[in-house]
Amino acid sequence: MENNDSKKIACQIMEINYMQKLKKDNNQNNYDLFPMGWFDIEDYKKKIEILAEAISKNIEIIQTKSYQDIIEKKM
C-alpha cells in the first residue's frame, strides 16, 4: 500500500510541475491542461510516465504518445 501512496504523491508533484511549466494564465488554476477523467485514473506509474513526457516536450498531456496509446487501447 505504501508503494502506491508513494506513486500517488510523486504523481501529484509531477502534476504541479506540469501546471507550472505549461500554465497559460497566472490568474487561473489551469485545470484545463488535464484531459477529462485524468483525476479518476489510478495507474500512477502510467500517469507519471505521461507527465514526464509532457513536461520534457513542453506539450499538453493529450499530445503525448503515452496518453494517445491509452486512448487507442480504450477504443
Image: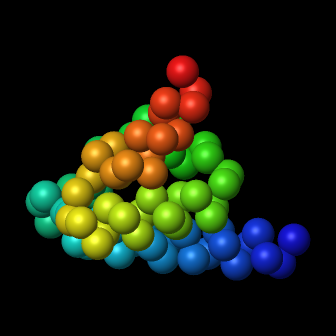
Which residue is at 66% across, 72% downward? 7
Looking at the image, which is closer to me, 28 or 65? 65
In the rendering, at what x and y percent does residue 67 appear? 44, 46
Q: Is residue 68 above or below residue 2?
A: above
Q: Quarter of the image containing the C terminus?
A: top right
Q: Is residue 7 visible?
A: yes
**In the image: residue 20, left or right of residue 27:** right
Q: Say which residue appears at 27% left-offset and 52% top-offset.
A: 60
* Residue lying furthest left: 25
Residue at position x 61%, y 43% in the image? 40
Q: Tell me which residue sits at (48%, 33%) in the image.
A: 71
23 left or right of 53 in image? left
Tell me how many marks there are. 0
Which residue is farthest top?
Answer: 75
Q: Tell me where residue 52 appears, x and y as whole percent.
A: 41, 69
Q: Position of residue 17 (x, y in %)?
A: 35, 75
Residue 31 shows up from this direction: no
Residue 27 lies, in percent from the top left, at: 15, 61
